[in-house]
Structure formats: C-alpha cells, structure tokens
Image: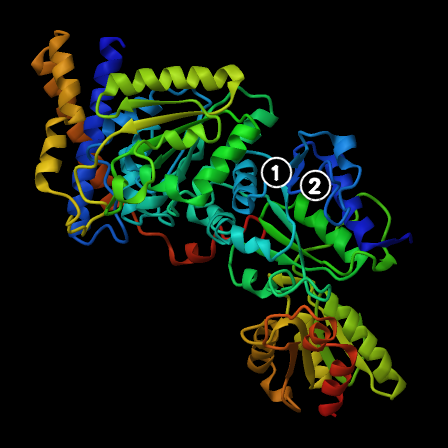
Amino acid sequence: MPVMTIREAVSQALWEEMERDPNVFIMGEEVGVWGGTYAVTKGFYDHFGPERVRDTPISEGTIVGAAVGAAMNGLKPVAEIMTINFAFLALDQIVNQAAKIHSMFGGQFQVPLVIRTTSGGGKQLGATHSQTPDVIFAHFPGLKVVAPATPADAKGLLKAAIRGLDPVLFIEHSTMYQERGEVPEGVDFVLPIGKSEIKRPGKDVTIITYSKMLQISLKAAKQLEAEGIDVEVIDLRTLRPLDMDPVYESFKRTNRAVVVEEGWRSFGIGAEVASRIYEECFDYLDGPIIRLAQKEVPLPYSADLEKSAIPNPNDVVAAVKSLL
Amino acid sequence: MDQAELLRLFKQMVVIRHMEERCAELYQQGKIGGFLHLYIGQEATGVGIVSARGPHDNVITAYRDHGIAIACGMEPKVALAEMLGKATGCSKGKGGSMHLADKRLRFWGGHAIVGAHIPLADGLALADKYHGNDSVTICLFGDGATNIGYFHEALNLASVWSLPILFVCENNHYGMGTSIERASAVPEMRQKAQAYNIPSAQVDGMELLAVREAAEQALAYVRSGKGPYFLESMTYRFRGHSMGDPERYRKQEEVRKWQIDDPIGKVEKLLLERGVAQADIEARESEAEAIVVAAEKFAEESPFPAPEELYRDIYVEA
C-alpha cells in the first residue's frame, strides 16, 4: 500500500473526484492561484482552470451560501472555509440553510455539499484561531460532520462526502497534514460515513476519541503497553451520525472508558459519548467514565501555556491508570 | 401587453389578494400557525416581475413568499395546504407559510432568515452559468435585507463573478416596524448596488405594467451576459409586518394614502380604459374567488402528515 501524508490524501481525493465528475468544483479563499492555505489544492488551478477552482472574496457566509445554492441547482461544490474559527461567520448558512433545506422543503431539494475546514490548536495562533468547536456543528440534524485522523480515513471519507447527496462538514486538523500512513490504492477507495473504527484492540480500558486526539491516545496506549496495560482505542471518525455500536461492544468487554477530545469539556463529545454509555451499558460499569478535554480557557498564545491546556499522552495515561 | 395577458395577470393578482385575506382568517381561527406575512399591497411587484421570466429562469425570495409562489405558478391549494400543515402542501407540511417552494416551477423557496437566500441566488446562478444555460436567477428581498452582511457579500460576489442574477428589492418602506429612514444610511436601496458596480433602476411597484416592463428590460440585460442587475420596486404592504403587528410605527393616514394606490384597482381601471367590459372583469374576479374557495376546501380536507413523516427527508442518504 502506498504511504502518504494527510495533505496528499486529501489532495488526491479532491483531484480524483474532480476528474471523475465534472460537476465537482472547489470554491473558497486562496484555493486557486495561491494553491490552498495548507497547500492541499496546489496545482489544481492550472489543471482544472478558474471555473472549477474558484477563488472567492473573504466572505464566509456567502462562500457557503453560494455553495448551497449551487448544490441545490445540480453542482457538487467543495467549499473551503480556511479554518473552523471562520465558520462561525458562516454558521447561519451551515445550520439554517445547508442542514435544513432538504427536510424543510419536504425533500424536494438536495444539498450535496462538502465544506472542508481545519480545526484544532497548538500552533500559537491565539484564542480566536485555535479553537476545536467541532461539537457545535454536530448538534444539528441534517448535517453530517466528519473528522478523520489518518491519511486513509481522510481520503476514503472525503471521497464519500463528495459522492454523497447530503451536506457534510469535513474537518481536517490543522497540525496533522504531515501525518503519514498507508492508503489503499484505487480511485474507488471510499469509506462509509458514520462508522467508528477500533484503531487499536485491547482489553483493559476503552478510549474513545477522534481527530488529533487519536494520535495522542495511541501514543498513550504505547506507554501503557510498556506497563502491561492494554487499552482499546476507538476512533469515532464521524461525529454525526455518531456510530456508538463499536463503543458499546467494547465497553461491555472492558467496563471502563476514557473519552479524549481536543475541544472544551463542557457540553462536549465526552459528555455525549459518556451519557450514551451510561444509558446503554449501565450494568457493565466498573467505574466513572472519564472525560479528558481542553482546559476551560480561551487558548493563550504563549507556547507552554497553550500546550498545557490541550490533553497530552501523559494526561491520557493518568486517566486510564485512575480507572484500574 | 395584450388584453388576454393583462386579464390573466389581473386574475392572478386577485387570487393572491383573496388567498391572503383567507390566510388572515385562517390564522385568526388558529388553523395557520407560526408567523404569517401577507403580500397584500405588493401584488403588482411580484406578478409584474415573475411574469416577465423565461421558462428556465429561477425565482428565490424571502419569507413574504405567498404572492411570489402563486406568480411562479403554484396552485393556491398546494400553498394553503402547506400553511395548514398538511401532507399535500408543497413542502409536505414541513415548511409552513415562510417556506413555500416548488422545484418543478424553479421556485427555490421562501427563506426565513433575512438576507440568507441572497448568497443562495449566487449559487443557483453559478450552476446555470457553469452548465452554459442562459437562465437568469431572480432574487427578491425586502428593503430590510439590504442592511445585512449577506446582501453586500452576495452582490459583491455576483458582480465579481458576473453572475446572471436580477436582484429585486421590494421596497415596502419598513423592515418589520423600522422605517427605511431609521434603518438605512441611503434613501434609495439601489444606491447600495452602485458600490458593487451593478447597474440599477427604480420602478413604481404599484403599477403592474411599469414593473413588468422594467423586469423585461432588466432580464434582457442580464441574459445578454453583462452580469447582475438591480431593480428597486417601490411598494407598500397594506397589512402589518406579520399577523399580530400593532402597527404603532406608522399612521393610518399613510396606509390609506397607499391604499388609494391599490395595485389591483389600478389594473382594473386600465382594463376598463382599454375597453374590457365590466362583466369580463367581474367574471375573472369570481373565478379567482372560486379558486381560493376550492383551495381552502382542499387544504382543510387534506390529511395531516403521518407520524412516521417526522423522521423522513432529514438526509437523502441516512
């Protein structure tokens, strides 16, 4: 299997789907001449031309809104919002238009739209540019929210999002583009949206996580392994629809769980996942479900302070040990 | 405009008027829920604009959408059924008064977040341009929407990308209860189009023929590939912003002054001047009334959505 970075995986998915379907096009800030803020669409403008790789003004609400309209009228837009922090400017279009139009008009319109964006902190970008508010978008029925953590998942799930007929918010992690991994060959390598996956089997404690925190959790798993503790790590991959079956199945074996997310703890992924486990697996509980998350502060600029606010492998190790 | 077309549009305006009056009743009876924004007074604008469109042109509007829906060809019974929350409504009872739409009529909705549909119009037009169609997208909105960010972003993008859009501002002088003088830095909404290098015109929105002619010219301009155009139609709503509006923000004399300008009365006068018999006009009025009576009966007798509808159409692919 070829090994590539997440950047290459995302880029390949876009390229292949644009070659495959002439209705797929890209629009967003700096996607064209610049080649993408994270260099994901480098070379696209020259190959596909300005009609299909459309640089936009800095108008997030209208980038998403125009993409919604284009999707309703037969195109398959991949709109790019440079970072999820700017998606708040498009929040109305995402939640009030993209997520509603299919159902609100009785199913007569489809909105086959992908919104690509980046999330996450750790780059000293200050409080407004470092957030991980993924969960906010997962609140809304009608929208699908995908957040992959490996090159294979990034490629397979992005292709699924583009080929699908529903609006998808596709969240990439801003610090993970250089992550490498194996990606199955073939233009039709597509993964199903809405499926969690066990990324590391184990028997002692279940760690439920996604995106960058998968990497952190797998590092913790290695440390724990050295101490004879065998954790199972589940990657949610999709936040809506949330696939809990592998989580329940795992929890019924381990009876202990830690949920690790980069965003804030209050009203977060951990709260949702833990509640569902309590509801479905009450008789299997051997301890409280632990939620690891970002400290409840706007992320500071100064490097060490910023780092201290985001969960690291040692935090995960400590949380797991506290359950045993 | 020939006599037959003028009579057809007259009848359409009367259908809208009757339907809206029935809506007010049905709202007071508690049969229509939520918000209800009536089109009474603005009929010449909606009918004049939409009747000028070609068969493949798109129409998209805001929440004061009943008149636009009828002008696009929606049957009153389907519109009323929607407002009554019935399964036979255009949106299967999921949308309500503010969300009428019919894809087959290229009527892309009623949208209830002020200004949010203006970017959607950019996208509709982009798709047609992308596919090489010569369709024009007609995007209607109120004067209030010209103060929201979407308006400015979407006009800018439409101009930068030279999109085939006819922007139509239905200037009824009030954004809810706030007059344009109190809300807008410029007295004419079309002045805002100048900032985006979009040519514009203003028209008397109470005069059907004037609106129609202005719309024809504007559509021809856009269809020629020159990019978007902005038309401001000066109009007035005779009723409140929505039902339950105490109307403390305007004087009854002002409303009465505009009511003298009744767009339907003006078309009737024009028909008489052109020698159409009073009996022919009255016949159209009776037909319009009968359509609305039958529509209401259909809507009342239609079933409510089945309980299992609750989970349908949330996603195309669940």
Q: Where's residue A168, x and y in %? A: 61, 51
Q: Classify mark 2: helix, strand or loop.
A: loop
Question: Can you give x and y, in whole percent of width and height, for residue B67 in the image?
Answer: 28, 33
Q: Are marks 2 and 1 in contact (CB under 8 Å)?
A: yes
The residue beneath circle 1 is A56
Chain under label 2? A
Residue A49 in the image: above or below residue A114: above
Q: Amino acid at mark 2?
A: Val
Residue B59's place in the image compared with B247, above or below, is above
- To which chain does the residue with label 1 belong? A
Q: Is residue A43 above or below residue A104?
A: above
Which is more N-terminal, label 1 or label 2?
Answer: 2
The amino acid sitting under disc 1 is Thr
Q: Is residue B92 left or right of residue A209?
A: left
**Occupied quadrant, residue A242:** bottom right
Q: Which residue is mark 2?
A: A31
Quadrant hosting residue B230: top left
Q: Looking at this view, is A41 or B28 the one in front? A: A41
Secondary structure category for the residue under label 1 = loop
Q: Nearer the viewer, residue B243 or A273?
A: B243
Q: Residues within 10 Å of mark 1 (few under 14, many from 20)?
A: some
x and y, in percent, of residue A183 in the image: 85, 54
Residue B276 visible, this orientation = no
Please tell me which residue is depicted at 55% across the width and 80% down the height of the picture: A279
Tell me the quadrant of the picture where the C terminus of chain A can be found.
bottom right
